[in-house]
Image (cartoon, helix red, strand yellow):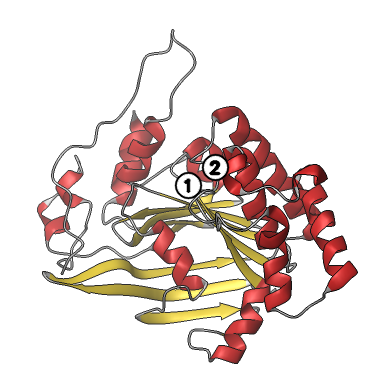
Amino acid sequence: MTPLLEVERLEKFFDVSAGTLHAVDGVSFKINQGETLGVVGESGCGKSTLGRVVLHLLESTGGTIKFKGEDITHVNRTKLSELRRKMQIIFQDPFASLNPRMTIFQTLAEPLVIADICKGAELEEKVYKMMDTVGLARRLVNTYPHELDGGRRQRIGIGRALILEPEFIVCDEPVSALDVSIQAQVINLLLDIQRDMKLTYIFVTHDLSVAKFISTNIMVMYLGQVVEFASAKELFDHPVHPYSKALLSAIPNLDIDQESRRIPIQGEVTSPINPKRRCRFATRCRYAKETCMDSEPVLKEYSPGHFVSCLYAEELDQDKKRV
């Protein structure tokens, strides 16, 4: 089966005064139709940049992007317009991503008008139908973003992404700016829509609990590179990379009688500007050896479907088994 989205050695570098910033550096992955790839990691690891490069909101520095088997790494304006109907994004901040001078109706209708899909009564019908789909009361059709709460604003953003009936959506931390109770509603909405419309997601998040709930597979990023990739269940049951283990240990435990097993991450963060070809996590890894400072690990299949980028993955995992 051909993956819906296939990314190979994708790079996005930025020229800054101090040199070249490696925001996304050699990232590879595949997503099949109907799946959700959760992308997790600390702020600044390249999660959001990755999503924007895939959608051509930022142009890649290197690597390839294939959508439904077609190479879309470099496309002209006409092809890009076609892709916009198939690939959309839900932004993190629902207030900043909405035009404050446009009503709900105008915001949802704009993509249809730009794509010249429909007009008049048909356009109005599609807008109202989308409001029903994302759970917005029709009486709010002429309200502005500042008149609504964060949950409703994000539902507008979701509706705007869905109105062109895309096949693939980048969800860029779509619930991080919302209250916890509203987060659950929005996540369930995204799951319901995915099932009904057979959508494929990249779901960028800091919250590993959310990633586990919504994701088919999870990709852990650190300073622009993938350090671990596995199914959601496999990653939570059997994390291998020291960074993944530390992230998972930070998830709050509701059992107050259980001893905390949080793994602290200490040390200085490696600069993403002109990084040396070595393990970028080595300066913060408790298991780092001299070799880690001289050799750059590559992402290898540690077990079926489970990929890890660590020079001593097997050794560390054997230590865990002996304990």
Q: From the top left corner, tell me how far across and down residue 191 is, in percent.
A: 71, 47
Q: Give residue 175's mark.
A: 2
Circles 1, 2 touching at the beta carbon (< 8 Å) = yes
Crowding near the residue tagged with mark 2, few <14, some 14–19, many ≥20 C-alpha atoms within 10 Å: many
**Residue plotted at (34% across, 80% down):** 61
Instruction: Depth check: give the residue in front, 119 or 254.
Output: 119
User: Who is closer to the viewer here, 174 or 282?
Assistant: 174
Taking depth in this image into account, of 200 and 320 the one nearest to the observer is 200
Q: Which residue is mark 1?
A: 205
Vertical side of 15 occupied by 32: above or below: above
Quarter of the figure with residue 9: bottom left
Amino acid at dot 2: Val
Q: Residue at x 17, y 49 (%)?
A: 269
Nearest the eye: 110 or 72: 110
Please report the residue visible at 45 percent of the width from the left and 72 percent of the height from the top: 53
- Residue 92 located left or right of residue 19: right
Locate residue 292, reporting x and y percent: 17, 56
Residue 187 drawn at (x, y percent): 64, 41
